[in-house]
Amino acid sequence: MDKLVLFNNSIKKQFINKRASETKFGESISTINDVCNIYEALNNLDVSYVIIGLPEDVGVFANHGIPGTRNAFEATIKVLLNIQDNDYTFAENVLILGHLNFDAELEKLSKLNPKKKKDFVKARKLTAEIDKHVTKLVHSIVKANKIPIIIGGGHNNAYGNIKGTSLALNKPINIVNFDAHTDFRKEEGRHSGNGFTYAFNEGFLNKYFIFGLHENYTSKDIFKRLDKNDQLDYNSFEAIQIRKELKFNTEIKKAQNFICEDYFGIEIDCDAIQGISSSAMSPTGFSITKTRRFIHKFAKNKNAKYIHICEAAPTTKNSAQIGKLITTLITDFMRGHES
Ligand SMILES: N=CN[C@@H](CCC(=O)O)C(=O)O
């Protein structure tokens, strides 16, 4: 696990703003200071949730997207550490493990030119390298019977999450993806728009439900592929929120019936949320409250094996707000899962 940078007490101290008579979340979480065998270390630890960061935007670049997703983990940690430790936040059940250091890949990315075709090929190869590290880390966490809470990065990381979880559980897993896009583009080299395609074709992903896709951004070919395969299902944002042909809660039940009878992962792409800075930021989308309800409802199911919150791309101006959003989604997941 050469790229894993452990979240330690000195980083923690740097970010926590202590207050008399209050205990902050960061004061009560677990950290690991030294690790030879990550699986052993996790297995011996009495926590349920393991938070990890994937600070990269290589897969986003490789998919012609707008970078910035590398900044979401730090923005989140700064806020998360400072929420309250109380009966609703489960800090004693959390290990903040750390992040994968993709500086070398990001350095290579900085030399690529988005106008050159061959540089996309290079970025896609780098994304495939990132996949290997994500797969290995997620595999260790799930194998140790903990629930990874994965803070993106781009949605390319869905591939490593699915593969790592599937290998740890020795079977393909199901996925519900709250997303404006299917990320079911063709296998043209790895990027943020085809993580589910690769996972599906390689047999790590069994049933896949895309919740709230945007009709303007899904190609005829992808619709055709979704429609003809019983392992794939979806609904659209327009059918639920605009035309009101479908009801939000009924659709949640439909997606639950489709995926929850077996182990599953929850993928949350922040571009599905209205106006949130992300690689494919959109002025239209679900409200934050609906996103929170969605997470709560799926997290309640004991077959939920991980959550991945990705594609948020904080700017210097809105970093604290994005950190607060992702923190809220993390705690919604834990509250749901504990209920
Ligand atoms: N993960 C996002 N994938 C979308 C959006 C691409 C973008 O960043 O603009 C897709 O491939 O369509």
Image (cartoon, grey):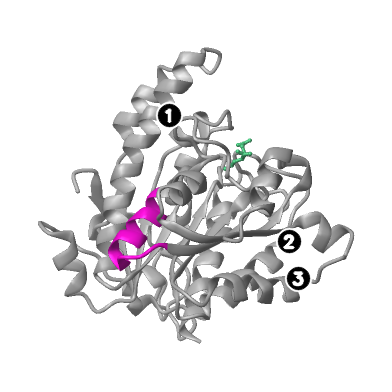
Q: Which residue is mark 1?
A: 124
Disc 2 CB within 8 Å of nearest ligand 1 atom: no
Q: Amino acid at mark 1?
A: Arg
Marks 1/2: CA–CA distance: 32 Å
Residue drawn 68% across the image and 39% down it? 221
Q: Residues within 10 Å of mark 2 (few under 14, many from 20)?
A: few
Marks 3/2: CA–CA distance: 12 Å
Q: Which residue is mark 2?
A: 287
Residue drawn 77% across the image and 47% down it? 215
Quick one: SS at disc 2? loop
Marks 3/1: CA–CA distance: 36 Å
Q: Residues within 10 Å of mark 3 (few under 14, many from 20)?
A: some
Residue drawn 36% across the image and 54% down it? 163
Tell me, yes or no, whether the highlighted magenta stretch contains residue 129: no
In this view, the residue in front, 254 or 248, is: 254
Q: Position of residue 113 (x, y in %)?
A: 49, 15
In the rendered view, tell whether residue 32 sits above or below residue 69: below
